[in-house]
Image (tube, coloured by chain):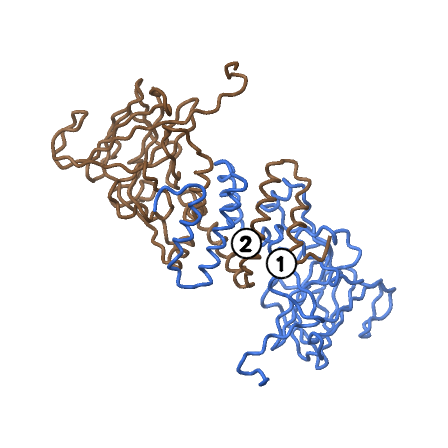
Chain colours: A blue, B brown
Amino acid sequence: MRDFDEHSITRAVIERFAETPDPRLKRLLTSLVTHLHDFVRDVEPSFAEWTAAIEFLTRTGKICDGNRQEFILLSDTLGVSMLVDAICHRLPEGATETTVLGPFHVAAAPEVENGADVSGGLPGEPLYVEGTVSAARGGPLGGAMVDIWHSDRDGFYDVQRSDLDHHALRARLRADADGRFRFRTIMPAAYPIPHDGPVGAMLVATRRHPWRPAHVHFMIAHPGYETLVTHVFVSGDPYLDSDAVFGVKNSLIRDYTQHAPGTMPDGTPVAVPWRQLRYDFGLKPLPVPAEEAPHA
Amino acid sequence: MRDFDEHSITRAVIERFAETPDPRLKRLLTSLVTHLHDFVRDVEPSFAEWTAAIEFLTRTGKICDGNRQEFILLSDTLGVSMLVDAICHRLPEGATETTVLGPFHVAAAPEVENGADVSGGLPGEPLYVEGTVSAARGGPLGGAMVDIWHSDRDGFYDVQRSDLDHHALRARLRADADGRFRFRTIMPAAYPIPHDGPVGAMLVATRRHPWRPAHVHFMIAHPGYETLVTHVFVSGDPYLDSDAVFGVKNSLIRDYTQHAPGTMPDGTPVAVPWRQLRYDFGLKPLPVPAEEAPHA
């Protein structure tokens, strides 16, 4: 086929995918070409604009490394990550809402005892965190794996700090037989997403700020349940209504309650003002495979 | 604003671009977000598919360097480059059709005399090329700059050959006062686009071949006219109907006529069979700026 015009070329490209063996890949590429071509016909880019787009994508790839994932930042700042999250997690009543994973999760965070101090000795306002893990509309999930990570008081994660040679503000711990967990740490802070790259340039050009409201990340796993990826945000944060990555949901905001110097619930003495967070998580059951389902 | 769902998030992201000073950038990003979100809602990607897309884009950026532009290959193989080309070049009668620039153009190719041998001594079937440059439905454009480049007999451009320390099969020359140009070279060959990267993996997964039919590239410039970027394809090439980048137009196919050993039109003796290409190009006039337009 030859002599495509600005309308017929879309059908010609889609037909070129006709022999794709994987039907899902064929569906993805067919839809991608349809929507991408519609976008191009809508905006009618100049050659200079097309070149600028090629160069933007190239710079975005080039800046990625083991500690920096600029395409995730782009997906986050265009709302695509939260859209995918919403589509992937249509939740039953009682299940905790989800939000973006973000680029700072580490697969093999240190495993600690339930109740441990995960501050790694970093300075900040002491924070006591406690909660439960249950099935959505169900009972406690004893032994659930609770993976937590958050920023330091200046808004930096351990992996962003070249002065740290160990993990801090990051750990995995197991809930007890009743699904209860607790740990001690310091207060997280609001922080800007990395904005010295192409995504930062996009934010500047569109007069958007790069800030995320303060939060603690949770990833909670238990056999038979969908792994929960979420944050708990600090109420009152000035960026709750303008999170650069559109990740805030009202159900994920909590008071990090303030306390005078004294004793934490686990008996730890604390000589300065401290904060307390409680959150009870609900996990979505995975579908039961057909061969295991009870007969109707 | 908080608690976006899979439909309301699109409006929320678009509103975040409300303060963009450049109205064209605002329009581009608004349309991009609209179509990108529609694509995501259409295919409902899994988290694993979203991750695969992030990794594909990252690899595509990483493999780019001074001699390799994988995002242009991606744009080419998805038909986006030819779609942009069609939109940017709605041509008047008599104007030569356009096609993709491709990744092998070099801005500062050597300038040679009209009539020169540009083969750089590379072996192949001798080819004599001649033609004219005119205004679309108008007279000759004396002194037009004719920039040409093409592959060797094995399908490689000079910039792909680590054994070459000089440019070959690539030159710029000026048409004479009557808009006529000619040069000697060797026959180009069909070739696969670079397919050892992410775009090649996409072609393999979709059972598409990476081949382009044989062609000579032309970029022709003259003050007051839109610079023409096009190819002239070799008739009979087996890939004319399945060009990996959708670049073929019937008006750009020519016989590269075969001749017995003898003498080329410029008097050059040739002891082996040789070929001849003739193409007459028409350039599209640029719009006349308002202050220079004649009064109606």
Q: Name the residue: 69% across, 58% down.
A: A151
Q: Quadrant of residue A274?
A: bottom right
Task: Out of A124 and A77, give the one closest to the viewer.
Answer: A77
Q: Name the residue: 38% across, 29% down.
A: B93
Residue beneath disc 1: A102
| Image spot of residue A217 (x, y percent) | 68, 63
**Hey, what amino acid is under mark 1?**
Gly
| Image spot of residue B251 (x, y percent) | 32, 36
- Does B86 sit above or below residue A119? above
- Does B143 sit above or below residue A284? above
**Hey, what amino acid is under mark 2?**
Phe
In the image: residue B161, left or right of residue A131: left
Task: Out of A16 and B125, give the one closest to the viewer.
Answer: A16
The single residue placed furthest to the bottom in the displayed view is A295
Q: Name the residue: 11% across, 31% down.
A: B262
Residue beneath disc 2: B39
